[in-house]
Amino acid sequence: KQEVTQIPAALSVPEGENLVLNCSFTDSAIYNLQWFRQDPGKGLTSLLLIQSSQREQTSGRLNASLDKSSGRSTLYIAASQPGDSATYLCAPDSWGKLQFGAGTQVVVTP
Amino acid sequence: KAGVTQTPRYLIKTRGQQVTLSCSPISGHRSVSWYQQTPGQGLQFLFEYFSETQRNKGNFPGRFSGRQFSNSRSEMNVSTLELGDSALYLCASSPDRNTEAFFGQGTRLTVV
């Protein structure tokens, strides 16, 4: 059974700092891994998808790395802004089933 | 391109009743998955449908069921509602299995 852990559980930073969010998973037999953000009471917004054969994926200020063999992924957010405040979730995909961690709650203060 | 549409957005039901939630995927997407989100358990997988067939099922009681229609729209049904079924139910669509998933805004179900 896939277990997903996200560290830290919460993070508060001043605007402009870089964010580093960690995700670890126990079963390396995954097809891909997705990072999402969730605003309170809302659905999930897809940020990045990394295929299992990739090591890294970038989109604007976001960069995600994947080390499938060690069961780790890291999301980097450069030059954080107050609008980045949200809960960030990682989800490895095994056979069409996304397994979610509990998320990292991020607050970026102006 | 329209996103994933879930209806209704909010629902209040009484214990013992049944409820049906609807999900319209992004045009062209054939895979639809359902998830339950609660403060205590987080996000948990319910089931996945592709071309009207259930391909995968999570660890939920038989009171939770779903189906997918020929136009890829999906419904999930919960019978004999319990207080613990109160949750945000999220639907995700993707072109196929193992491709990027896009989520709807969810249906907030409250059981009283």
Image (spheres, helix red, strand yellow):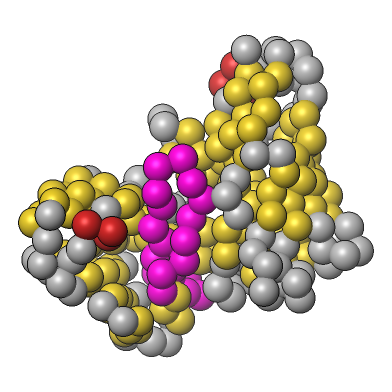
Is B90 above or below relative to A98?
above
| Residue B63 x, y percent position in the rendering | 75, 29
Residue appearing at x 86%, y 61% in the figure:
B52
Q: Horizontal placement of B91 versus B25: left or right?
A: left
Is B5 above or below relative to B94?
above
| Residue A6 x, y percent position in the rendering | 27, 53
Res B76 quadrant in image: top right
Q: Horizontal placement of A108 versus A23: left or right?
A: left
Is A110 above or below relative to B36?
below
| Residue B2 x, y percent position in the rendering | 68, 67
Report if residue B96 is visible in the image: no
Residue appearing at x 39%, y 65% in the figure:
A35
Given residues A100 and B112, the one toward you in this image is B112
Name the residue at the front extreme. Answer: A110
Q: Horizontal placement of A13 versus B13: left or right?
A: left
Report if residue A81 is visible in the image: yes
Residue appearing at x 41%, y 69% in the figure:
A47
- Is residue B17 a member of the stretch shown in magenta? no
> What range is drawn magenta here?
A27-48
Residue appearing at x 65%, y 39% in the figure:
B9
| Residue A11 x, y percent position in the rendering | 16, 50
Given residues A32 and A30, the one toward you in this image is A32
- Is residue A35 a member of the stretch shown in magenta? yes
